[in-house]
Amino acid sequence: MSLMRQIAWLVLGVVLAALVGAVGLSTLSTQQLMRTQLELKNADNAQALALALSQQGGDGELIKLLVSAQFDTGAYEFVRWRGVNGETLFERSEPPRAGLAPAWFRALLPITAAPGVAQLSSGWNAIGSVELMSQSSYAHDALWLSSRQLLAWLFIVGIAAAVVAWGGLRRIRRPLDAAVAQAEGVLVGSYGQVAEPRVPELQRLTRAMNAMVQRVKEMFEAQAGQLLVLREQVHHDPLTGVSTRRHFLAELDAALQRDDGPAIAGLVLVRLRDLPGLNARLGRAGVDDVLLTLVTALQAYPESVAGCRVGRLNGGDFALWLPAEGVAAETAHALADALRASLPAFGPGVQVALGAIELPRERPSGVWLGEADAALARAEHLGEARGGFVVEIVAEPGLGREQGEGLWRAQLQEAVGQQRGRLAEFPVCDRAGRVLHLECPLQLDLGTGFVPAASWLPLAVRARLTAQVDLFAVDLALKAISGDGQARCINVAPASLADAVFLPQLRELLAQWPQAARALLLDLTEAAATEHFDRLLELGQQLRPLGVKLGLEHAGAGLAQVERLYQAGLDYVKLDASVLLGVAGEAGRAAFVRGMVIMLRSLALKVYGEGVVDEMDAQALWDCELDGLTGPWVTSSLRG
Amino acid sequence: MLAAAPLLAAAAYDATRVLEAAAVRGPKVTEQAQALVQLIERSGTQDELQRLRDINDFFNRRIAFQEDAVTWGVPDYWASPLESLEKRAGDCEDYAIAKYFSLTATGVPTAKLRLVYVRARLGGQSLAHMVLAYYAQPSAEPLILDNLRPEVLPASQRADLTPVFSFNTEGLWQGTGQVTAGNPLARLSMWREVVAKVKAEGFL
């Protein structure tokens, strides 16, 4: 029994006991009083009658007349004249009068008064005694009425007491509930602080809990800080601070694989030409300055546009990934202009070549890099002729959709409205090969067969239809779960989270499938945690009671920057392929992954790995103690 | 009245309690009480007529007639036997009360004893008075124990007295009702009050 219920029962018990006790005691004492008074009345009336009868000179008829008169004008059960030997000489009696009080009440609280007796004399002669008994039903009626009135009054007082007690309990309950909610939050990994209540005991408890939460927060921040340092060391070029070749290639692979990017993206390669020659002329320190100037120009993009990546591929080779359509050529020209302005300061002979390409994202990374290299080579070739800055742009035209936004919108709405969609299934397995859950990206039929999210998600974001699409996906997943009981995971776009109607509709949908909802997982991107943190908290608070699990996907270096991750109350985190690719070959990368796992574990989060391609990496990741993996290798090894 | 008999039997005279109650009042009262207790003990073996005489003489000798207003400072006061013995004074009902409870203590049934209000003619004057009457048989002529005439005489020889009303402790504790000294609600009449006092002193 809960504490509150125990207290409530206790209060109820005390009030009831007081009520019953008061009524009982009062009734008993009233009964006692009634009996005493009735006995005195009997005795006094007998004496008074005897006094009158003793003055009649022993005249039997007169005595009988007086006895009758007394009986008729009073309320008596009997009036009796006894002779000197105790024999009854005359008696008037009637059965006990039925009063207002019910029979059970009379039986429970009998008022049995002794009859009144007085001696009769005529002159010196004793002529017996008179004995009388009053009707007790009047006393019973009075007792009955007073008991009922008392009960009614005490009932009212009892209700008032219960109301007051209930109010008091509510006052105690609020801070208690807050403390319990905080404790439950800590249990599921949401380290929130609460205001200290004024009740001293709870205040101490809350203070202790808050202090513990503060300590966890500090620990987490320290770990996150260490991870940031480690990341700098492992992923970044020590001179320029941009991604190393290995890390940039992993980032490129991950960017090409993920399904929420644009259909067409761009890649710009920048080469500082004749590095050995520059080294000879400017010295190592001078070349370093040139390289830093180059990087400064490149870094402007990732700093202002989310998803842009810069990497140093070789000594003088840099790459810039642009997750947007139609900006590659523009960017290359802008870069060239910027460099033209800044590089001449280092003297003549500092030459730069730029190659830019634009390709559909579904092409493999080999094609991307090959095309970009080819473009760069052409630029260099041109540069041989012209000298200075050269730019070569390769773009595959005609890939972008010609249709206008209105048409996409209609197509998307039609597909969702007609339920033309299906869930692809990619298993997430644990080390023993058991399927933990299925990642289920939605594929929609927009009139030309089913296409993956990569094709339509950018359109949906632009048309503000993600909430509808995501709800459709959740609906499909719930139906599938109730069919086979297999846990399934659905991606929720950050844009949906920002949509005010999404959460209520999601709750409604989940309420229709309470069983299946327990096996549902919802993936959110890092962006959801950084940009819509309050929404994420709300989502967690509303969905957790329904058994839905929440997690972050594509979590990488940015995770350390998610403030208050310790407070978000997530269930799991899926590490991005860009962090995981190549862990087998480089101890530093593995150390970073291990650090992430330890940090996330300390927040009671499960850690999964995404986009695992080869077995070596998989083995290395199991050694880092991840809870589960997904990706092509997992899918194929499960089939194999 | 028959039903009352066992209850009356239950309340009994107890010499020890009488002496204890007297000790509280002082050595002089103890002395008087010891004399009374010895008398009661002695009388128990004699016939009732002799007891009447002994008890009548005991109180007529030891208690002087005095108005309540002088003795107690109130117009009317019904004293218990020990109170009367302490003051060595009393008026007519104090004699009658002391004799009544002393006789019941010797074992005379209460049914045979009655306290009687009488009108006494004394020297041409008429005054309210109380005597104790003893009925050897229920319908017999009573013997009168009085303080005006110290000898025990049959009623027919007391032409100076006109009886008005009589009472005794019969029926006082009839039924289940408890009329005790401890119940303040029941202490309403002079008679009940004095009965309670006498009970507390151990005569009943």
Image: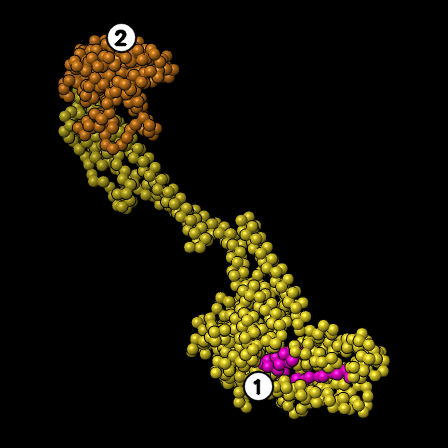
Instruction: Report in which chain the residue with disc 2 lies.
Output: B
Q: Which chain is orange?
A: B
The tag on residue B61 is: 2
Residue B84, x across and y down, in percent: 31, 14
Which colour denotes chain A? yellow
Marker disc for residue A180: none
Q: Residue at x 66, y 84 (%)?
A: A265
> Is the N terminus of chain A in the top left, top right, bottom left or bottom right quadrant?
bottom left
Regarding residue A72, the answer to whether it shows in the image is no
Tell me which amino acid carries mark 2.
Arg
Q: Which residue is at a point 48% across and 49% down the rendered structure image?
A: A164
Identity of the residue drawn at 22% across and 19% down = B104
Count the marks. 2
Q: Position of residue B63 (x, y in %)?
A: 29, 10
Does residue A185 show up magenta in the picture?
Answer: no
Picture quadrant where residue A20 is located: top left
Residue at coordinates 53% horizontally, 85% vertically from top-left? A444
Q: Nearer the viewer, residue A152 or A181?
A: A181
Q: Where is residue B118, by image quadrant?
A: top left
Displayed quadrant of residue A496: bottom right
Label 1: which secondary element: helix
Judge left or right: residue A379 versus residue B175: right
Q: Mark 1 points at which residue?
A: A410
Residue B112 showing in the rendered view: yes
Magenta residues span A248-273
